[in-house]
Image: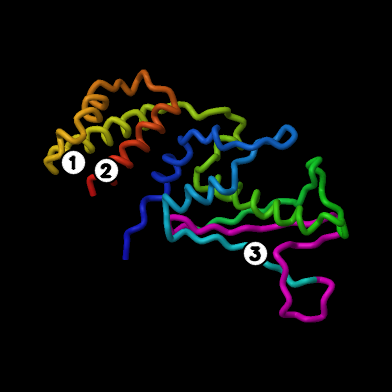
Amino acid sequence: MTEQPIFSDKFRELNSRDVSAHVEKKQNLNYLSWAYVQQELTKEDPNYTERVIEFPYPDCSNENFFVPYLKTNEGYMVCVELTVFGVTKREWLPVLDYRNKPVTVGSATAIFDINKATKRCMVKCAAKFGLGNYLYLGEEVPDVSDELKELTKKEAENFIEVVENAGKTEQFKKEIIKLKNMDVNELERQQIDKTRNLIKTWLGEIE
């Protein structure tokens, strides 16, 4: 059985990731693309699971009939559960219309709004694992921490060592020169993310 990574370490890593290129806007609110979040969680943990919590349908006598929303006098709520890195978290979200107002019970568009709310709820739940969390803190882009700079530097050094041990120095000559000349203290957030993603890609080519 594969050992799960330490949750606090993965949270810090995901929380420091710049996701600004994948932000969607609705009114004055920012949302991460559901497709992007699903993609990134799969990369981080291919075995992650997503569960939409279901509730008994209030207008049916069949006790075994469940729906993916909670119906109240005030409107609808949805709940999503994610299990990532072996940790499970839940998030609730009210179902809102295009004006970001609660959808009234019986609305003609309710079923579509519920579907959209479920996706947004999943995205918000993912923030509990660090991905896009800074958006809910009102920050535009996370700062480049000293910890992240050091991590990037170590990943670069590790890549160079792997290349040398594999006898592929000539094949990755340009990449090695680029990393050796890199000054992490001068890199902006997006450059840090790009560099780390490139290193992962290069390592994949070696393996």
Q: Inspect the magenta stretch and tell me whether residue 61 lies in it.
A: yes
Sooner in the amino-acid sequence: mark 1 or mark 3: 3
Cβ atoms under marks 1 and 3 closer than 8 Å:
no
Q: What element does badge 3 sit on?
A: loop
Q: Nearer the viewer's eye, disc 1 or disc 3?
A: 1
- On screen, 147 above or below 118? above
Q: In the visual, does 131 lie left or right of 191?
A: right
Q: Residue at x 13, y 37 (%)?
A: 164
Q: What element does badge 2 sit on?
A: helix
Image coords of residue 11 (percent x, y): 45, 44
Picture quadrant of residue 56: bottom right
Q: What element does badge 1 sit on?
A: helix
Give neighbour class at mark 1: few <14, some 14-19, many 20+ (Cα, 10 Å): some
Q: Residue 203, which numbered label?
A: 2
Picture quadrant of residue 161: top left
Q: Residue at x 52, y 36 (%)?
A: 19
* Residue placed furthest toward the front: 171
Give the alpha-carbon distance from disc 1 to disc 3, as whole Å: 45 Å
Image coords of residue 40 (percent x, y): 47, 47
Q: Amino acid at mark 2?
A: Leu
Q: Amino acid at mark 1?
A: Val
Please give the range of residues in magenta.
58-87
Image coords of residue 24 (percent x, y): 64, 37
Image coords of residue 102 (percent x, y): 82, 48
- On screen, 205 above or below 188? below
Mark 1 = which residue? 162
Q: Residue at x 82, y 80 (%)?
A: 61
Sooner in the amino-acid sequence: mark 2 or mark 3: 3
Give the alpha-carbon distance from disc 2 to disc 3, as whole Å: 39 Å
